[in-house]
Image (spheres, helix red, strand yellow):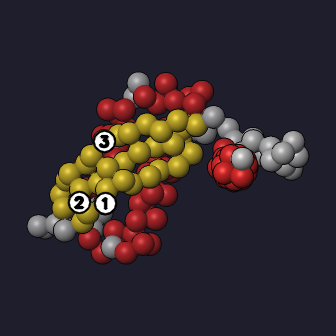
Amino acid sequence: MRKVLLVALALVVTAGVGYVAASRAWGFPLFGSRQEETSFEPAEVAIISLGQFLTNLADNGRFIKVTVDLEVDSVRGSYIADRVSELKTDVYALLRSKTYAELSGETGLRNLQREIRDRMENKYPHAVRNVYFSEFVIQ
């Protein structure tokens, strides 16, 4: 009888710990309490990949290999997705105009992000929210 009670107690403790861990991981209320809800509701976004770019830089003998992804408003995302070739041409033109010194370091990467986003903003206002690089190599 004592062994049965110990096994039952161990199961109850294990289930309780599992419930607490799951409530923290998945965000459901802990034992009926409601967590504070924030009024922040993120807008619907989508990620569109422009793919990998491999091109020469303005410096002789230097090149860049970069993979570019765009964070776009989901409402305008299909419009942007239909114009990927046009956007890729703009990114290639921008990359080919850059020198190694302009792209070096974190400031070079951040400036390139900003310039790509600005070009997209000029063509398609309020469509592109951010630019991400999943690969960035300059040689």
Residue 51, label in figure = 3
Q: Residue at x 72, y 52 (%)?
A: 2
Going by the image, does 57 lie left or right of 72? left
- Tell me the crowding category of disc 2: few under 14, some 14 to 19, or many 20 or more residues within 10 angstroms, Cα based: some
User: Residue 42 appears in which quarter of the rendering?
Assistant: top right
Residue type, mark 1 in image: Phe
Image disc number at residue 136:
1
> Separation of disc 3 and disc 2 at Cα?
14 Å
Neighbor class of circle 1 (other Cα within 10 Å; few <14, some 14-19, many 20+) is few
Residue 108: x and y, percent?
39, 69
Label whose residue precedes the other's in the sequence (1 or 2): 2
- Quick check: can you spot residue 133? yes
Q: Is residue 72 above or below residue 93?
A: above
Callout 3 secondary element = strand
Residue 25 is situated, as x and y percent measured from the top left of the image, at 65, 49
For the residue pair 99 and 81, the one nearer the viewer reads as 81
Cα–Cα gap, marks 1 and 3: 12 Å
Which-is-in-front pick, marks 3 and 2?
3
Helix, strand or loop for disc 1? strand
Residue sitting nearer the eye, 22 or 91: 22
Q: Residue at 72% of width from left, 47% of height from top?
A: 1
User: Which residue is found at the position 42% from the left and 72% from the top?
Assistant: 106
* Circle 3: residue type: Gly
CB atoms of marks 1 and 2 within 8 Å: yes
Residue 64 tag number: 2
Instruction: Look at label 2 and name its amino acid.
Output: Ile
